[in-house]
Amino acid sequence: MMLRRVLIAFLLVSIHLYNVKSEGLSPASTSVFAEEEDYFLHTVERGQTVYSISKMYNVTVEEIYMLNPGSEEGIKAGAQLKIPQKSGSYFYHTIQPQETLYSVSRKYQMKGEDIVSANPGLSIETFTIGKIIRIPTNKVTSPMEGDDNYNQIMTNSLLYPTLKTDRFKTIRVALLLPIGLKEGTTPKNAENNRMVEYCEGFLLALDALKKKGISVDLQIHDIGSGVDLLSNVFKMPSMQDVHIIIGGLSNKQIGLISDFSSERNILYVIPFSKNDDPLVYHNVYQINMPSSYLYSKVSNAFCNKYKDANIIFYQFGSANNRSDFVETVKKDLNAKRILYKEVGTSKNISADISKALDDRKNNVIVPVDDGAESLGNLIVPLKSILDAKPQTSISLFGYPTWQIYSKERTEDFFRLNAIFFSIFYANPTSPKVKSFYSNYQNWYSRELINTFPKFGMLGYDTGMYFIQLLYRYGSAYEANINKLVYDGIQTDFYFERLNNWSGFINANVFLIEFSPDFNIVTKGIK
C-alpha cells in the first residue's frame, strides 16, 4: 500500500515534466557508444577557456583547435565548440528536447542510478536542454526489465533525491599544510610563515566555535613542499574517518589529496590554489577562484557599471602585468558596443590623460599594471588634474593587490574614488575586522603579515564556514552548500559547480569602493 502511494506521488509531481509515452525505444545494440557522432557540441560559458574545456573532457587543446578553426584566437561565451568524442571511461551526451533521465537511460541501456552517480550535480534544475552529462562506458548494459511505467517513474524520480543525513557530534578535521616546522625550530621561509599564520587563524575559529557549543577534533600534518610525506599521512588510522581535509599547495599535492578524499567521500577544501584545471571530484571545494572565471565575472560587472562612462585604459610601456584582465574587459566592451580609449607610453602622464578626459562624464581610469610604482606614478598627475579642475569626475579602477598599499594610500584612494575587485577584502573600518586584529594580537603577540590575502583571516573564515556547515547539515552538506549564511572577516562564500560532474569553486567577488565622502563600500558580485 505504501509503495503504491509513493508511486502515485512521484507520478503526480512529474507527469507534466516527463510526459514520455512508452516510446517503444528499441533496445540499443552492444555498440551503442560507437554509433554516435565523432564529436559533440559544448556551449562556452563565461570564464571558460579552451584549456579548461580540454581538461573537462580529457582531450587536448590541439584537438579542439583542429575541430574549431579560429578558436586558437579566442572563444566567446555562448559559442559552440565541437569536442572530439574519445573512447574512455565516459561518453558525453547533450540533453535534447523532450529527453528525460529515463529515456537517456533507455538509450544507453543502463540504470538511471549509474548516470546520476557519474553526474553528482544532476538534479531537476540541471537536467535541462543543451546541458552535457557523462555516460559511464564501463557499465554493463542490458535491457531494462519489469513494468515500463514503473521504471519510468522511479528513474525520473532520481532527479528529486531524498538525502539521508548523518549528524556529526564532533567534527573531525585534518589540516595538511607545508608548514616547514620541526620541534624547536621556526618556519624556513615566508611561505611557511603564511601557512603557520593560516593555522593560527584556524585555531581562533575553533575557539569561537567552542563558545557556540561545536566540538572539533583537529589534527595538523606538515606535508612539506613535495609529495613524499603525504603517503605516510594517508596511512595514519586517524586520517581514515575525518569529515573534512583542508590544505595542499602544489598541484601534485592537491591531486593526491583529491584522490584520497574522493575514495573515502571526505569533504576536501583547497584554500590557496586558483588552478584553472576543472575540479575532478564532486567533493572538492576551491576557495580561490581561477583567474579566467574571476576576470570574466568582474568584466561583466565593469561593463554594466560603467556603460555610460568615459573609460580610459592607461598603459605603462613594458610594465603591463594586468594586460590579460584588460583584454578580457575590452572584448566585452567591444561586444556590447561600449566605447573606450587607450592612452599612455609617453613620459607625460598628465598630458596623456588630460587629452582623453570628458568633462560631461565620469572618467574611469584603468591602469594596465597593478604594481606599487605604476600606481604611484598615476596618482600624482591625477591629483594634479583634480587640483586644477575640481569639478572633473574621476574614478580609479584597479586590482586586488592594491589593498597591500591601501594603508599608505587611503587618502589618495578616497580622493580619486578608487575601486578595485577582490575575492578577499578586510575592511579596516569594520568592527569585526578590528576585533579580529585585536584577538590575533592578544593570542600571538604579533601582527598579521602584510600579504594578500591575509592568511590568518583566511584560516579563520575557512574554519568558521565549513565547520558550521558540517555541524548544521552533516553528511548532506553538498546539497545545502549555499544555505549557510556567513558574513566573513575577509571573504564570503558562494559555491558554483563547474559542470554536472565536477567540484565547486567559490564564486564570491567583491567590488571595494573608496567614495569621496570617506566611506568604504563593499558590494558582492554573484
Image: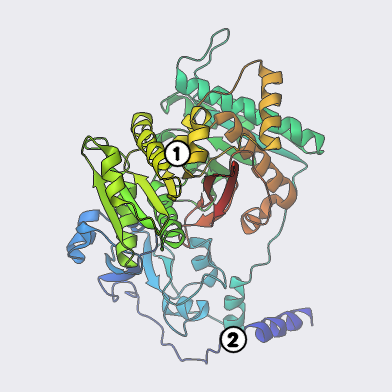
Q: Give residue 149's position: percent from left, percent from top.
A: 59, 87
Instruction: Identify the residue at image location x=24%, y=54%.
Output: 61
Secondary structure of the residue carrying numbered label 1: loop
The N terminus lies in quadrant: bottom right
Q: Give residue 401's position: percent from left, percent from top.
A: 44, 35
> Against 448, is 123 above or below?
below
Q: Nearer the viewer, residue 184 or 302?
A: 302
State which mark lies toward you, 1 or 2: 1
Q: Quadrant of residue 2?
A: bottom right
> Against 217, is 45 above or below?
below
Instruction: Identify the residue at image location x=67%, y=81%.
Output: 10
Instruction: Identify the residue at image location x=45%, y=36%.
Output: 402
Badge 2, how many Cα within 10 Å: few under 14, some, many 20+? Answer: few
Secondary structure of the residue carrying numbered label 2: loop
Q: Give residue 523's position: percent from left, percent from top.
A: 57, 51
Q: CA distance from mark 1 to mark 2?
A: 50 Å
> Against 34, is 360 above or below?
above
Instruction: Identify the residue at image location x=37%, y=41%.
Output: 385
Are discs 1 and 2 less than 8 Å apart at CB? no
**Tag 2: amino acid:** Asp
Q: Give residue 111's position: percent from left, percent from top.
A: 51, 72
> Against 396, is 341 above or below?
below
Q: Nearer the viewer, residue 352 or 79?
A: 352
Instruction: Find disc 1 in the rendering and name its residue.
Output: 273
The C terminus lies in quadrant: bottom right
**Tag 1: amino acid:** Ser
| Mark sitting on residue 125 | none
**Label total for image:** 2
